[in-house]
């Protein structure tokens, strides 16, 4: 980050402290992974306790089973579950599992969607609207795009017709139920249902990437939106701030990774199912009780409402999207073209005013109303001068 990043010394609750002693109000919590804020006493105690028992073992461990049982109890579609060390590994293994099960190579992904940093999914539309893909980063061989078909999130008819067209070569459709495409985009009514029905009709597996979206309900996005995938990938909050990923689902599909009798698909990984991660994740999920979800919802609503008020006051044509504690800022057709420059400068403008994070926000349970007001006031202040200048430039 220009001119240089913040170097964090310590963090607690809702605040970071940098190497120069500045205190910063955090609005993103390690890319959404700390749903109870930094260094929560119960999560820290669980990490400490487990660190005194075993930090890494080449064997199943009891705390890993406890975390798996907690997840399976929340998510009825999880018959079987495997742990990884990141969301990237979870989506990667989920796709390999779908290919191994179906014996097909193609995967349909949504344009602009992010599923982590492995070659096979770092593919977007080759040209706008195209179903053909191309790598969106250097280092990915162009021919990997041959295995990917590109659809458009919330384009129900388009995605269904792609499933029909490629059916006999398509292993899976991977969807983030609440897409992260620059901002967080909720599914249009009927979109997930139609994709589910088309996938089932053609023997194509439906994969959900809930690495972020799991936090929107006790059973994750599939509970909130009422659509059941065949496999789901997890990460972030299920590790309580420790490195984590997991994926699982239908017992017959997950059977391709079953080590008994020799798996068709081996899933090796020195740190898979790490017990310290599992202890932190378990403590985190136990704190995510029946009171936590309405609290997160209310915090998200208040933050989104205040943010809309600030943008209205500044006469800025920006949309605020909110699902639970996830809030994001999106442009509209009326947003001036020059907004892009202001947007890019906001991160630094906010850091200089004591706030960390801009554009996509993930509020933790330990946030309070006064902190929402503080954050929105600072955002309002940072935007005051550029917003006035933007009124002079054309809409774009
Ligand atoms: C939807 C989604 N999938 C996968 C990933 C990758 O997870 P990780 O960063 O743990 O590898 C992310 C990370 O932001 C994500 O947002």
Image: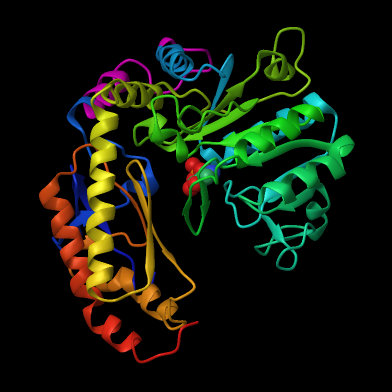
Residue furthest to the top: 261
Q: Quadrant of the N terminus?
A: bottom left
Q: Residue at x 86, y 44 (%)?
A: 165
In the picture, measured across the screen, residue 199 lies left or right of residue 53, that is: right
Relative to residue 4, is residue 153 depicted above or below? above
Residue nearer the viewer, 15 or 44: 15
Q: Residue at x 59, y 50 (%)?
A: 117
In the picture, measured across the screen, residue 22 lies left or right of residue 110, that is: left
In the picture, measured across the screen, residue 78 lies left or right of residue 74, that is: right
The quarter of the picture where residue 274 lies is top left
Residue furthest to the right: 168
The quarter of the picture where residue 131 lies is bottom right
Q: Can residue 352 be seen at all in this image of the molecule?
A: no
In the picture, measured across the screen, residue 363 lies left or right of residue 70, that is: left
Residue furthest to the bottom: 392
Q: Can residue 67 be seen at all in this image of the molecule?
A: yes
Tell me how many marks there are: 0
Q: Is residue 151 magenta?
A: no
- Residue 162 coordinates in the image, percent (x, y): 79, 47
Q: How is the protein colored in the picture?
A: rainbow
- Residue 346 coordinates in the image, percent (x, y): 32, 72
Residue nearer the viewer, 290 or 241: 290
The quarter of the picture where residue 255 lies is top right
- Residue 219 coordinates in the image, percent (x, y): 44, 24
Q: Residue at x 61, y 21 (%)?
A: 249
Stretch in magenta: 43-62
Relative to residue 78, is residue 351 depicted above or below? below
- Residue 4 coordinates in the image, percent (x, y): 34, 71
């Amino acid at each position: 980050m220009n001119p240089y990043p913040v170097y964090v010394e310590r963090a607690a609750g809702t605040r970071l402290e940098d190497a120069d002693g500045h205190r910063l109000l955090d609005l993103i919590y390690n890319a959404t992974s700390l749903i109870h804020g930094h260094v929560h006493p119960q999560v820290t105690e669980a990490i400490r306790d487990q660190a005194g028992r075993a930090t890494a073992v080449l064997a199943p461990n009891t705390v890993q089973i406890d975390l798996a049982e907690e997840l399976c109890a929340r998510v009825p579609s999880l018959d079987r579950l495997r742990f990884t060390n990141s969301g990237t590994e979870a989506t990667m293994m989920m796709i390999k599992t779908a290919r191994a099960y179906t014996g097909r190579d193609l995967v349909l992904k949504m344009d602009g969607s992010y599923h982590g940093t492995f070659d096979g999914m770092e593919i977007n539309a080759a040209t706008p609207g195209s179903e053909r893909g191309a790598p969106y980063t250097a280092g990915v061989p162009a021919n990997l795009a041959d295995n990917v078909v590109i659809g458009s999130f919330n384009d129900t008819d388009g995605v269904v017709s792609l499933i029909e067209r490629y059916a006999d070569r398509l292993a899976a459709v991977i969807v983030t139920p609440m897409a992260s495409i620059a901002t967080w985009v909720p599914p249009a009514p009927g979109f997930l249902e139609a994709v589910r029905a088309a996938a089932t009709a053609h023997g194509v597996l439906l994969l959900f990437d809930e690495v972020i979206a799991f936090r929107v309900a006790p059973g994750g996005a599939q509970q909130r939106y009422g659509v059941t995938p065949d496999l789901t990938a997890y990460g972030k909050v299920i590790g309580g701030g420790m490195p984590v990923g997991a994926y699982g689902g239908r017992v017959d599909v997950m059977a391709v990774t079953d080590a008994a009798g020799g798996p068709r698909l081996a899933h090796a990984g020195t740190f898979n199912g790490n017990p310290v991660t599992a202890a932190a994740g378990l403590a985190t999920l136990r704190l995510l009780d029946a009171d936590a979800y309405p609290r997160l919802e209310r915090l998200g609503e208040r933050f989104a409402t205040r943010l809309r008020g600030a943008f209205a006051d500044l006469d800025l044509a920006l949309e605020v999207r909110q699902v639970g504690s996830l809030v994001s800022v999106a442009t509209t057709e009326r947003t001036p073209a020059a907004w892009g420059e202001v947007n890019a400068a906001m991160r630094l403008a906010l850091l200089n005013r004591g706030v960390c994070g801009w554009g996509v926000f993930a509020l933790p349970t330990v946030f309070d109303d006064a902190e929402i007001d503080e954050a929105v006031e600072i955002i309002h202040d940072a935007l005051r001068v550029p917003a006035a200048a933007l009124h002079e430039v054309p809409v774009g």
